[in-house]
Amino acid sequence: MADISALKKKKIKNNRLGTPPTATEKGVNLSKPSSGEKVPIQVKISPEIRRAFRAYAAERDLELSELFIYMFEYYKKSN
């Protein structure tokens, strides 16, 4: 008689990722964004600084990215 418990323990692994791309296919993450295109940046700051930064930008009717660029340009000039 066959050992059924041994058969139950053996599992067949399925490839859940699907078929890999061919060598000629290019992934989305491999293309370089154009020079005028905005790309995300991720920084970790305290919730208080985040709140103050967002409020400061809103008071001056600026996007967060615009305020960041102004701040960075000022920092480069002064240092």
Image (spheres, grey):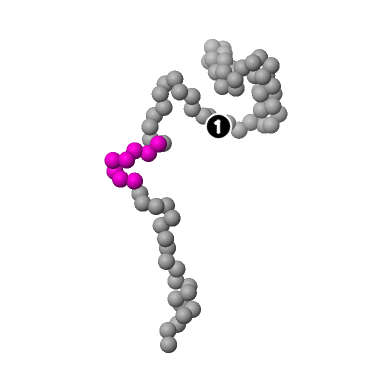
Is 18 displayed left or right of 64 in the figure? Answer: left
| Magenta stretch in the rendered image | 21-28
Is 15 displayed left or right of 65 in the figure? Answer: left
Residue to which mark 1 is pinned: 42
Percent across and percent down for residue 15 are 41, 57
Q: Quadrant of residue 43?
A: top right
Number of marks present in the image shown = 1
Quadrant of image for the C terminus: top right
Q: Is residue 24 magenta?
A: yes
Whether residue 68 is visible, yes or no, is: no
Quadrant of image for the N terminus: bottom left
Callout 1 secondary element: loop
Q: Quadrant of residue 25?
A: top left
Residue at image point 67% right, 19% down: 58
Percent across and percent down for residue 48 are 71, 29
Q: Is residue 39 magenta?
A: no
Residue at image point 38% right, 35% down: 30
Residue at image point 51% right, 29% down: 40
Residue at image point 43% right, 55% down: 16
Main SS of the magenta segment?
loop
Percent across and percent down for residue 23 are 29, 43
- Looking at the image, is 18 positioned above or below residue 44? below
Query: Given the image, on which type of amino acid does mark 1 rest?
Result: Gln
Residue extending furthest toward the top: 77
Is 7 displayed left or right of 55 in the figure? Answer: left
Percent across and percent down for residue 70 are 57, 15
